């Protein structure tokens, strides 16, 4: 579905804010006292049909941003359709994890009472920082210590959950912690460890322009916090090299 970019309002016409779909969604979020930070998922507050309206609104507003950058969007064939493409990319691709509901996750009972360390990774991570909207590209490992009451997830579902959490404007520390909450909620293991290593393009493409540095962070929950040997086993198995 392509978003239509409406012409800017004539003088004296209603401003976009009077009827903006984003305003309707915002009011619902505020009425239910739900947070709507950049890395929050707001899918439950978007009614059927409003996703397309939102895409059209973002396109219209991005069109205005391009005009403010003094780009001749009316005559420049390269940027004529850029606002629509950016809106589509934000809503359906790079920030889709804000606007769509969580992926369906198949959960299997731990019938054979597996209680050994399980590691998934490296999963490829694509995100963007909420400070500059620059890409974050990296790798992530998930370590789990299940117990007899844990659910086991299909392997691909860890990647789907990670993608859902990462495809939002994020900061790495909060992204990893949000993913940990999602995995804990579904698997209910005795312990969970997540390590993420990523390039931040806000430090490479711009700013300090340090191409070599990466950010590595981890979240340890339950048994991984208490048991240094388990933590060591996980870290040695993922064998993270700079
Ligand atoms: N802690 C943390 N910081 C991040 C992450 N992604 C980007 N940043 C940093 O966020 C900071 C934003 O800093 P500001 O000083 O407000 O912005 P700025 O003036 O554009 O900063 P410079 O990047 O130094 O030019 C920068 O230091 C970024 O490197 C992240 O995932 N975690």
Image (tube, rainbow, N blue to C red):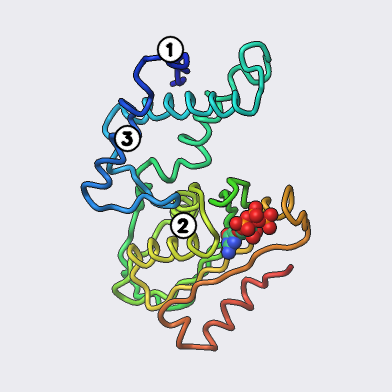
Q: Position of residue 119 (x, y in %)?
A: 53, 68
**Label 1 sits on residue:** 10
Quadrant observed for ligand 1 in the rendered image: bottom right
Q: Residue at x 54, y 24 (%)?
A: 63
**Label 3 sits on residue:** 23
- Residue sitting nearer the eye, 122 or 9: 9
Could you tell which of marks 3 and 2 lies nearer the N-terminus? 3
Q: Position of residue 168 (x, y in %)?
A: 48, 48
- Of the residues tagged 1 and 2, which is closer to the observer? 1
- Residue sitting nearer the eye, 145 or 219: 219
Could you tell which of marks 1 and 3 lies nearer the N-terminus? 1
Could you tell which of marks 1 and 2 lies nearer the N-terminus? 1
Q: Which quarter of the rendered picture does the C terminus lie within?
A: bottom right
**Label 2 sits on residue:** 158
Count all numbered tags in the image, as a single digit.
3
Q: Quote the CA–CA distance across marks 1 and 2.
A: 49 Å
Q: Is mark 3 within 8 Å of ligand 1?
A: no
**Is disc 3 placed on a helix, strand or loop?**
helix
**Is disc 2 placed on a helix, strand or loop?**
helix
Where 101 falls versus 139 (above or below)?
A: above
Q: Residue at x 64, y 28 (%)?
A: 69
């Amino acid at each position: 579905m392509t978003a239509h970019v409406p012409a800017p309002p004539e003088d004296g016409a209603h401003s976009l804010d009077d009827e903006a779909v984003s305003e309707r969604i915002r009011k619902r979020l505020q009425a239910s006292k739900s947070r709507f930070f950049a890395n929050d998922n707001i899918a439950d507050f978007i009614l059927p049909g409003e996703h397309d309206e939102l895409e059209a609104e973002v396109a219209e507003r991005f069109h205005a941003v391009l005009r403010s950058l003094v780009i001749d969007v009316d005559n420049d064939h390269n940027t004529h359709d850029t606002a629509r493409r950016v809106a589509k990319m934000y809503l359906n691709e790079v920030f889709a994890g804000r606007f769509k509901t969580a992926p369906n996750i198949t959960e299997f009972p731990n019938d054979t009472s597996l209680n050994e360390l399980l590691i998934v990774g490296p999963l490829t991570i694509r995100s963007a920082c909420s400070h500059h909207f620059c890409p974050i590209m990296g790798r992530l490992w998930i370590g789990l210590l299940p117990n007899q009451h844990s659910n086991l997830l299909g392997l691909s579902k860890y990647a789907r959950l990670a993608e859902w959490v990462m495809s939002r404007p994020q900061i790495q520390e909060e992204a990893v912690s949000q993913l940990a909450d999602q995995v804990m909620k579904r698997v209910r293991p005795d312990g969970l460890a997540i390590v993420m290593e990523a390039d931040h393009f806000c430090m490479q493409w711009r700013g300090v322009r340090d191409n070599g540095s990466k950010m590595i962070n981890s979240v340890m929950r339950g048994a991984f916090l208490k048991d240094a040997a388990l933590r060591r086993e996980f870290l040695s198995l993922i064998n993270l090299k700079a």
